[in-house]
Amino acid sequence: MILFFGTKTGKKQTKTLNTVSCPYCAQKGTLMTVSQSNYVHLFWIPIFKLKTSKFAECSHCKRGFYEEEFTPGMEKGLNR
Ligand SMILES: [Zn+2]
């Protein structure tokens, strides 16, 4: 029997943080976050979530932020 086992990338979710200002250029409402989850699948059925990668981008200064650089305000805006 062959086991089809591997990892799969989940749906991309984007969110605009309207109430959060950019830590770099201080513009409000220009930050957009993208989160994408990776799953371990067996026969293409997701078994468990591996990790969620998150990053943010500012549409004003075009700076990208990794999850480690998120400010508490960004985290709050993202989890709301
Ligand atoms: Zn900015």
Image (spheres, helix red, strand yellow):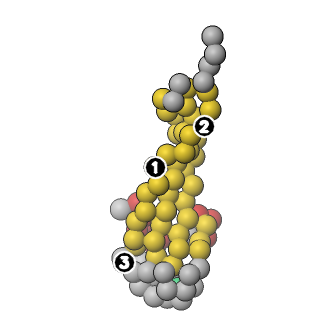
CA gap, disc 2 and disc 3: 35 Å
Q: Is residue 17 left or right of residue 63?
A: left
Residue 2: image quadrant is top right
- Can residue 21 be seen here? The reply is yes
Question: In this rendering, is residue 51 above or below 63?
Answer: above
The residue to which callout 1 is attached is: 11
- Picture residue at 45% right of the left edge, 88% below the top: 27
State which tag comes first along the sequence, 2 or 3: 2
- Picture residue at 55% right of the left edge, 26% below the top: 42
Question: In this rendering, is residue 60 above or below 31?
Answer: below
Discs 1/3, front: 1
Cβ atoms at labels 2 and 1 below 8 Å apart = no
**Helix, strand or loop status at disc 3:** loop
The residue to which callout 2 is attached is: 7
| Kind of residue at disc 3 | Thr
Which numbered circle lies on residue 19? Answer: 3
Residue 46 lies, in percent from the top left, at: 49, 33
Instruction: For label 3, count other residues whose C-alpha is less than 10 Å away and answer few (under 14), some (14-19) or many (20+).
Output: few
